[in-house]
């Protein structure tokens, strides 16, 4: 009797739980190349506040319907297992816009694909002068900083639960911690000001049945052990531009956490086709081994990236995504 192919959502959930699906799933935290691939932005300008406020309720419903149709078209044609649900009303789970959007998506794809969105509540690399303020607070008021970290985590946990109840399936935890040279805090300070609060967010999500994907760019290797200790389902980006090698990470923690990414975005911008192909093939070779891998770039398909390069890595993924050892 022939095996039933998994749905994209089943592939993602299997990989996120360190299993081996029939095929390696794919997704991106964001897809910024919709105009190049599909001729328009996913979210049309009619959603701008100055335009949206002028629409009648019927016009708003029609706009949400049309956007849901296009949203599904984009992510089903790309064959994403997890669709990044950035939409007007996101973050406000009781809003008319979010409820209507999720309802329309489910009417179109059912449970065959997952909806993912942001859910972090930990400190990230401070911007500009905020770095000085952050450093002073570490020195002068560490307990006050920890109290703020606790409040941020509690707010994130509550919002994540509400968003899950409103239809979100997967949380993207996107606070950035690392430069190419390493984390913005020493491993010792990271353990004091980040790790306990990231752990709380991941643990609460697990209790509520929400998979988490922890994203950070840069060189994560000095804090890799702490990220894994926080028990996200997956770690995302695995930035090769910062020297992170999926083969090494797979050996170190591949039995503890799903890995996502490592396809070199810099090469997709400036490298040759041969270099891009080699990067994608390397990630599939060493990432997919034994399961627990989701194929994607080391950041996102960003505006300005040559669209043919993104098509190229998708072609490589389609060529190598099957697990021959999958037994159903």
Image: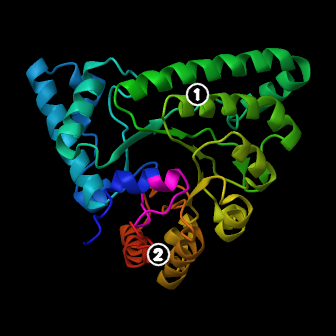
Regarding residue 323, the answer to whether it shows in the image is yes
Q: Nearer the viewer, residue 5 or 49?
A: 5
Asked whether 16 falls inside the magenta stretch, the response is: yes
Measured along the vertical axis of the image, is residue 125 above or below residue 243?
Answer: above
Location of the C terminus by quadrant is bottom left
Identify the residue at horizontal 25%, vertical 36% (top origin). 45
Q: Position of residue 312 (x, y in %)?
A: 40, 75
Farthest residue to the front: give it: 1
Looking at the picture, how far across and down is residue 51, in whole percent?
22, 26
Residue 27 visible (yes or no): no
Checking the image for residue 204, the label placed there is 1
**Going by the image, does 171 lie left or right of 60?**
right
On the rendered structure, is 138 left or right of 43?
right
Which residue corresponds to the image point at 80% horizontal and 14% vertical from the top-left? 144
Q: Which mark is residue 325?
A: 2
Residue plotted at (68% across, 33% down):
199
Element under disc 2:
loop
Front-lying residue, 133 or 8: 8
Q: Circle 2: is it few (<14), some (14-19), or many (20+) Cα within 10 Å? A: few
Seen as rendered, the residue at the extreme right is 139
Which numbered disc flags the more N-terminal residue, 2 or 1?
Answer: 1
**Any mark on residue 266, and which?**
none
Q: What's the magenta region?
A: 14-28
Q: Residues within 10 Å of mark 1 (few under 14, many from 20)?
A: some
């Amino acid at each position: 009797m022939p095996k039933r192919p998994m749905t994209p959502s089943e592939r993602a959930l299997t990989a996120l739980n360190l299993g081996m699906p029939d095929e390696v799933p794919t997704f991106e935290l964001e897809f910024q190349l919709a105009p190049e691939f599909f001729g328009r932005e996913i979210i049309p300008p009619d959603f701008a506040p100055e335009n949206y406020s002028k629409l009648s309720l019927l016009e708003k419903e029609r706009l949400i319907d049309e956007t849901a149709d296009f949203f599904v078209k984009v992510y089903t044609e790309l064959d994403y297992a997890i669709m990044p649900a950035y939409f007007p009303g996101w973050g406000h789970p009781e809003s008319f816009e979010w409820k209507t959007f999720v309802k329309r998506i489910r009417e179109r794809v059912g449970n065959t694909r997952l909806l993912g969105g942001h859910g972090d509540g930990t400190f990230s690399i401070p911007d500009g002068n905020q770095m000085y303020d952050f450093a002073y607070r570490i020195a002068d008021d560490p307990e006050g900083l920890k109290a703020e970290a606790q409040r941020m985590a509690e707010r994130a946990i509550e919002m994540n639960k509400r968003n899950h109840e409103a239809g979100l399936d997967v949380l993207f935890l996107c606070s950035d911690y690392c430069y190419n040279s390493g984390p913005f805090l020493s491993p010792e300070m990271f353990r004091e000001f980040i790790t306990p609060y990231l752990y709380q967010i991941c643990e609460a999500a697990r209790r509520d049945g929400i998979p988490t994907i922890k994203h950070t760019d840069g060189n994560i290797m000095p804090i890799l052990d702490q990220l894994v200790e926080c028990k996200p389902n997956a770690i995302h980006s695995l930035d090769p531009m910062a020297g992170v090698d999926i083969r090494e990470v797979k050996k170190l923690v591949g039995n503890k956490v799903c890995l996502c990414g490592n396809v070199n975005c810099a090469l997709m911008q400036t490298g040759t086709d041969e270099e891009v192909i080699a990067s994608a093939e390397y990630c599939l070779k060493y990432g997919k081994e034994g399961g627990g891998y989701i194929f994607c770039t080391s950041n996102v398909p960003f505006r300005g990236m040559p669209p043919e390069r993104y098509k190229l890595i998708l072609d490589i993924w389609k060529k190598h995504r099957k697990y021959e050892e999958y037994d159903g």
